[in-house]
Image (cartoon, rainbow, N blue to C red):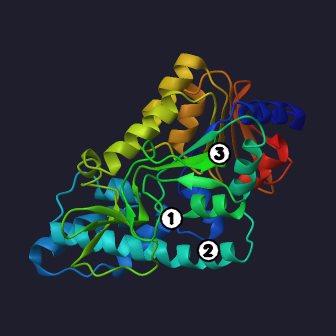
Amino acid sequence: MTEEQITRTAQSCFQGCPTIVLGSGASMPHGLPSMGELSTYLFENIETDGDAEHDAWLLVKTALSNNDHLEAALEGKTLPPSLLSKIVGLTWSCVNAKDKQLLETAAHDGEFALGRLLDNMFSSTHSEVHVVTTNYDRVAEFACNSKNVLFQTGFAPGYIQKWESTGRVKLTHGTKAARVVKIWKIHGSLDWFRTADDRSIGLPVFELPSKDHYTPLIVTPGLNKYEKTYEDPFRTTINGADAALKNASAFLCVGFGFRDQHIHPKLIERCREQNVPTVVLARTLTEEAQDFLRNKAGTNYLGIERSGTGSRVYSPSYPEGTNVATPDLWSLEGFNSLAL
């Protein structure tokens, strides 16, 4: 497969103003922890109290020791609420530590490949771009800031932010509607909290507030993943993400493992209905991602992962993949070099 053929597919995706899907692999180049690193952090730092917590966590640790990924290790297990609270708090702390470091980079004119992509997408007539992400971090927000692009996550502007949903707050630039990136954070965000009196608020903080007054609104892998999503802000956020995926004219998936049942089925449905251009980028494509490309992505797809010093490219003509010498095509920077 030639670089010219790869470029044509990449540009077809970009010109379709893709709905962008970000997984943990999209944040890792910025120093954010992988799911494996988060697993290790929890494994090493959870301290249990009492027999119920000890027995429940032992089952999880055993699964992790047997090389289950974090979601598989937690899913289907009955964990005491006190243990779940510890998992949420430590997950927040693990991701936040790296997110805070990234803030310093962003504040000093740090470069974000995602920011460059979004800025170029607004060089046309598009007034909205949708980003659907499973990540808690603020990489997408920092990327928007790096190019002075406005974004919405569902909370009203301010320091103590009220939940409004992105359909009710309208941003304008002069007399015209502003161009906005709508970021659908279906698993929550580091700056979302539930108050003691059961309100959802946004607090742009980098230290965990008192657990007596604030609970992080992040949906960790495992038992409570689907229970929490029936409540706002998750319910409205997931509905918005569903609409963005259902109406997408193209998909660009970056570092997404295709293991999330909120996103994966919608991608499949849209590809089957409309055969939209789809590009999947990852350092290493998961088995689920490869299965999606081979069997469910239609006939207008491109998958790219790292292979030695070059890249391995998957397409309808090469469903099992073919190696190309060009390095870093699997990264978002590599995609930008092809598409922009």
Q: Is residue 168 left or right of residue 274?
A: left
Quadrant (top left, top right, bottom left, bottom right) of the C terminus: top right
Quickly name the residue at label 3: 179
Disc 1 from disc 3: Cα separation: 23 Å
Mark 1–mark 3 contact, CB under 8 Å? no
Q: Which residue lies at the image location 45% right of the left edge and 71% below the top edge? A: 159
Quarter of the rendering containing residue 213: bottom left
Q: Mark number for residue 220?
A: none
Q: Residue at x 67, y 72 (%)?
A: 106
Q: Is residue 33 left or right of residue 160?
A: right
| Residue 254 visible somewhere in the drawing | no
Is residue 131 shown above or below 294? below
Residue that mark 1 sits on = 137
| Mark 1: amino acid | Asp
Residue position for label 2: 102
Q: Position of residue 202 (x, y in %)?
A: 39, 65
